[in-house]
Amino acid sequence: MDASDTQAFDACLRDALVRTREWVPRWLDKLHAAIKDREFSAGQLSDKQVLMQARTTLESHRDLVATRFLAAFAEAMENALPHTGAGSRRSPTVSFDELELMGDDQVQETVELARVQQVVKMAVDEELVTLTALLNGAQGLTVVSPDANPLRSEVVVGALMKALKGLHVEAAVRSRWLQVGAMSLGDALRDMYSQLSRQMERAGVKPAGYVVTQTATSRTTPGPAASGAARADSVPAHEMLGSDALLTLDHLHQLLVGNLDQGDDAPSDGGASGSGNAMVRTLASEVVTLMLKRIAADERLLPPVRNLVQDMKPALLQLARTDPRFFADKQNPARRLLDAITARGLAFTSEQDPGFAAFSNQTRGVVRTLLKPGGDLAERFPAQLEEFQRSQAAAVGPAQVQARGLAVQTLVRVEQRNLLAERVATEMRARNDFDKAPGVVRRFLTGPWSQVVAQARLESADAAPSSPGESAAMRYTDMLPDLLWSSQLALASLNRPRLVKVIPGVLRTLREGLDSIDYPREQAEAFFQALMGLHEAAYKTQRNEPAVDEQPSIQPEMDDEPWMQRNEVRDTCFMEDSLPDAPPTTTQPAFLDTQPMQRDWADLKAEMAVPRAAELPVGTWVDILQDGQAMRWQLTWASPHGTLFLFTGSSGRSLSMTKRGLERLQEQRRLRVVADHGVVDEALDEVARQAWINSAKAE
């Protein structure tokens, strides 16, 4: 990112706060005047009373509304910055799962928010497009990402809703404020966006470009263009719904909580469908239709997979008549079958991938079975789910299953040893004689030797009980006083007989310990040469010479990359090229001076605002660029402390890496998150979002 553009971006955000302090009072004045006008012109006494209450309440809360709105907007703008986002998918306004847990009043508030945002968005659309492109360009983006604009209208409206909900004001009053003030709020935002755009243009900022979303399937390798955004939702409203769209947020909420079952509307089929009423069946069918349309447009799935899912539509619509909420129950066999098929479908990037033909044939057989006529459709789903899972499990050979089990077992052990090694290093630093030792010795003890002691302690815990004196861990610790003393020139030179006596035992114990962890011989010899140089200097120092020892120095920050032995690298299929550019020996703890890798997450581009390593849930699908080719992997295991990760490919192959290695691949644009949530989950979230939009348009 160019320094001048960075300054222009920061200046724009600061100016937005200043301008907001100016227009918010004016907007509140206009809101008060508009309510007063409607109050005088209201024909019904009840309407006049409601408007009078809204006006008088606004008069007494005006300053508080302005103060809280400004504070909420500043906070919302900071939280909306690209680098603070935690997810790779666009967050729905209301998720499908959350909707079922909402009360009626929460649903109504959500609908009010939708209506205000709809009015405001229509008022600012053109100016917002221009400002978004300029703010994106100032962040160094070449393709517009709407979510990278922290001043977008939904951020402002969301801040307003938060401020109003924090007031002790009746819901009817808040609702009236929003209804009356939405248009003037849009006008105020439009003016601010226009002024900020002119400011960015005067600063010389070049806007990012909009791209047109292609309808044809496109599979790209990770890179900036791969996550570019068009000026449209991934599934436009006119494609999701017809002109006679029925589904609103309130209807969907009632369907999920079962409030429609007691309606007076008797089913037209005399109850043969088994549902409570025709409204339930109609809404359930519409949800299924919208869900399948969303999946049909999901280009992460290959076209044949999407076609197979669409072929299931008649069976799913028939099921919706007898079990209208099956899609909301994640344990329902039909929902689980749909989840399993779409999840497995994400494993393939080409029809030529190993295993795709078998998966396709298996899925096609499932569809044929479900589409057979008969009244036992509900019973077929559990059987087909079991058969599909069995078939997919059988596709992975016993050797691959065994290799994955070994990899998990090894990674657990690696994490245990590294965490224990950190505690051992802390114990060493707490010793009274530690700080006086030369830096090369201190780094060795808190690096490789802490691994030696940790390994010995783990082996001792696993072995049969024995006397403490026979413990290797005890011997490796008991040697420390002699090592630390012998490396200090000022002390060792005063007692050469002791120096001569302890050196052989120290060197023998050091070699034994390093061999126990298969420490690279070349690095071990480098340390021994440095240590023997210290011993030789101490031995040759004359007693009448002033002994000048190396002054204690601050120990440099050690590389916290979890360390693996060479056999562990092999057993876990460790991805060594996820480590920094360096010789292969960087997988070992180094005692030489090292420079820790500098990372600044704020500099990551918005189009790669994917979850960080520790935030990736198990089950996430990613593309990893290896040897110039993007390979599809699924995160199938993460260590208990989140330091090591195991991925599995469609063929059953495994790949492991550290947390820092995973983050490094993200920084290098060699890793792209394909899906960190289920395809069906995301499709249903889009259904809820579309219902939210329909509610905003409803009169």
Image (tube, rainbow, N blue to C red):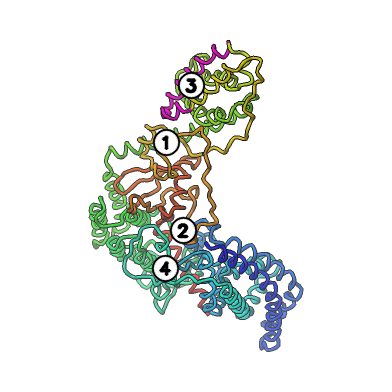
Q: Residue 510, labelled with which disc?
A: 3
Amino acid type, callout 1: Thr
- Asked whether the viewer can see residue 257, the reply is no
Residue 280 is left or right of residue 130, and the answer is: left
First in sequence, mark 2 or 4: give its number. Answer: 4
Question: Relative to 136, does residue 477 appear above or below in the rendering?
Answer: above
In x, y percent, where is residue 698? 51, 78
Between 556 and 230, the residue placed more toward the observer is: 556
Amino acid type, callout 4: Ser
Q: Which residues are magenta?
A: 497-526
Residue at numbered disc 2: 608
Amino acid type, callout 2: Met
Residue at numbered disc 4: 234
Residue 285 is left or right of residue 90, and the answer is: left
First in sequence, mark 4 or 3: give its number. Answer: 4
First in sequence, mark 1 or 2: give its number. Answer: 1
360 in magenta: no
Real-space CA distance between mark 3 and mark 2, rounded to the nearest whole angstrom: 46 Å
Real-space CA distance between mark 1 and mark 4, rounded to the nearest whole angstrom: 45 Å
Between 212 and 322, the residue placed more toward the observer is: 212
Looking at the rendered structure, the secondary structure element under dot 3 is helix
